[in-house]
Image (cartoon, rainbow, N blue to C red):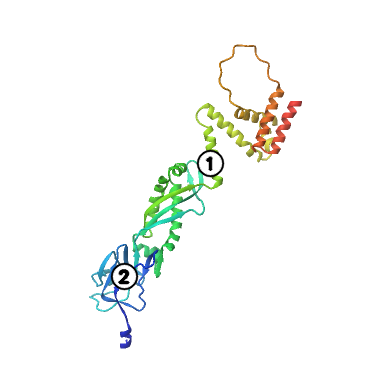
Amino acid sequence: MGIGSFIKKQFIDVLQWNEDVDGVLSWRYPMQDFEIQNGGVLIVRESQMAVFVNEGQVADVFGPGTYKLTTQTLPLLTNLKNWDKLFASPFKSDVYFFSTRVQTGRKWGTPQPITIRDKDFDMIRVRAFGMYSYRVADPRLFFKEISGTRDSYTRDQVEDQLRGILMATMASSLGGANLPFLDMAANQALMAQQVKGDLATAFARYGIGLDEFNVASVSLPEELQAALDERISAGMKGGMSADKMAGFTKYQVASAIPLAAQNEGGMAGIGAGLGAGLTVGQTIGAALGASLAPQPIPAAAPAPAPAPAPAPAEDSIEARLEKLKGLLDKGLISAADYDSTKAELLKKLIG
């Protein structure tokens, strides 16, 4: 090496990172043609860690403090460089600084619903949103698994990877939970607790520590929410008592009418299965008559009297026609089903 080149060569006496740019988690000290001076000083501030890397292999890791760089303070690098005695000349090594500050107020959400198993509803799709915070806990793992040899690695870059880990972990955690979705949705802290433990384990594999995790809101897609509302409505009519069970049965009958109309043969197909189309009309009329008619107020038993004459058959059929029209107006049956059943009833009425 010529004397001119030697004079031009520059040495680094102090290695430090001022964190001038917010949101940077990993930063490589710009070595270029510089060399680290033997006995140079390494300054690692609070909320930082520094890592020496020799030809892509992680060597020594330093926490907060001030260090004089010798073979005593760089034992692993000394071994990698085969320094069998005190080195007396400048040396080359990549030095990476890592910010270990807690990254607070980071938002997470499910752009698309995630599908999970549920003990009540079997399979459901869930949307959820919330906040979380994290930090670089193990710079050695973080360097090997995520940041690598990049000049810098930012918070936005790492969160692009964390988002996928978060969604996969949430689906697995909620799907394997024994708690029903309705319980977790009603208690968002419970839902967050269910996910946080599994998520912390997943993050740790990449050298990241999960500090906080919370769920701000949880919801179902609109079509599933509508189905859930319908089920809740039915549940309000159901129960263990005979009266409530009868109400739930009537609800099922009314709900089954539009579904039956979609089957091959429509209402006529059901009528054939029951024996006659008229029987369907009677079933509908009886179920809906009991469910829609006002319930009488209990009164004292009347005095014995001669058995009243049976109501004219025409009145009963007319009542069924009125209730059938009500079903059509409410959209519970199709026009074709209405016309078919109406024809059967009219035929019975007029002979």
The residue at 39%/50% (across/down) is 196
Labels 1 and 2: the sequence-earlier one: 2
Which quadrant is home to the C terminus?
A: top right
| Badge 1: residue crowd in 10 Å (few <14, some 14–19, many ≥20) | some
Secondary structure, mark 2, is loop
What is the x, y in percent for residue 147?
40, 65
The amino acid marked with disc number 2 is Gln
Left/right placement of residue 314 relative to residue 251 reads: right
Residues at badges 1 and 2 in contact (C-beta under 8 Å)? Answer: no
| Badge 2: residue crowd in 10 Å (few <14, some 14–19, many ≥20) | some
Whether 349 is drawn above or below 265: the answer is above
The amino acid marked with disc number 1 is Leu
Q: What number is the disc on residue 228?
A: 1
Residue at the extreme right: 351
Q: Is residue 109 visible?
A: yes
Which quadrant is home to the N terminus?
A: bottom left
- Residue position for label 2: 16
What is the x, y in percent for residue 92?
32, 76
Q: Which of the pair 144/325 is nearer the observer?
A: 325
Whether 137 is drawn above or below 31: the answer is above
What is the x, y in percent for residue 38?
26, 76
Secondary structure, mark 1, is helix
